[in-house]
Each structure stands twice: as C-alpha cells, then as structure tokens.
Image (spheres, helix red, strand yellow):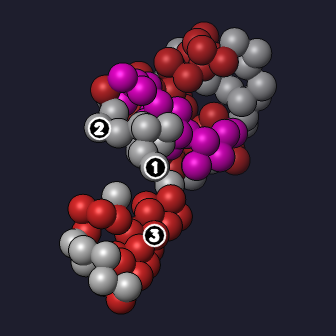
Amino acid sequence: MIEASDLSPEAKRVWESLDEGLQKTIQKDNPFRVERDNAIFGLSKRGVKVDILAEITGVSRNAVHRIIMRLAYPVSDRPYSRKRRPAKSRINLEALYRELLFGLNKAFGRGGDETNAK
C-alpha cells in the first residue's frame, strides 16, 4: 500500500479524497485486474491526470495510458486494426513488383501498359 507521505502534493490530494476501498482497488498488487482497470479508467474520466494515476497506483505511466486507451476505445470502435492493415513492406514489395514488371514489359515490347503487370 502506498504511503501518502511518499506522494507529490497533487497526488496526495487525490489519494486522500479516495475512500479506502477504492485506494485498495487501484493498487498495482490487486489481483483483480478488471476491477482495477475500471477504477483507473473511472478516475481518468473524472479528470485525474495519467502521471498522478501512475503515482498513486504504482503502475507505470505507460501502462496507465494503455489501460485508459483500451477501455476508452474498444477494438470494434477503433478506426483501424493492425490485423487488417497490410504491412508496409508488403505494400512496397507489390509496388516494386508492378514497377519492375511494367518496365520489363515496356523494354521487351509487350504492351507496356500497367494492366499487363497485374
């Protein structure tokens, strides 16, 4: 459990405003991750900064930010999913392939239009 004396003044004010149950819920060592994450997200919605949340929970700033983003934007609501986007390397390889094939066709007199390259 975090001691109030170890916190910055702003974090101390937030910590003291929480009831004891919520203080225990948001701690890093809480085995109930879903409850902890929901409590952290609720505090962020109430306007507590990520740095303050990281300080009072004992969870890294990066992890707190990921928790907030995961709960604020569920996978189905995200504008894209990494699984659906082709890798840049694949896009670049396909473009290079079309460019080379188009150039070879043109050099050997085989039409020279890019429709033959596909």
Badge 3: how crowded within 10 Å, few (<14), some, or many (20+)? some
Identify the residue under disc 2.
Answer: 79
Observer-nearest of 31 and 13 = 31
**Position of residue 21 measured from the top left corner of the image (x, y, whole percent):** 60, 10
Q: Give, as a single range, the part of the protein colored magenta.
A: 58-76
- Give the residue type at disc 3: Tyr
**Position of residue 111 measured from the top left corner of the image (x, y, whole percent):** 24, 74
**Position of residue 3 measured from the top left corner of the image (x, y, whole percent):** 72, 36
Q: Compared to 93, does 49 lie above or below?
A: above
Identify the residue under disc 3.
Answer: 97
Quick one: SS at disc 3?
helix
| Mark 2 or 3, closer to the camera | 3
Q: Which mark is residue 54?
A: none
Observer-nearest of 92 and 107 = 107
Residue at the image point whose x is 42% and y is 45% from the top: 85
Of labels 3 and 1, earlier in sequence is: 1
Identify the residue under disc 1.
Answer: 86
Q: Judge whether residue 53 can be spotted in this image.
A: no
Of labels 2 and 3, earlier in sequence is: 2
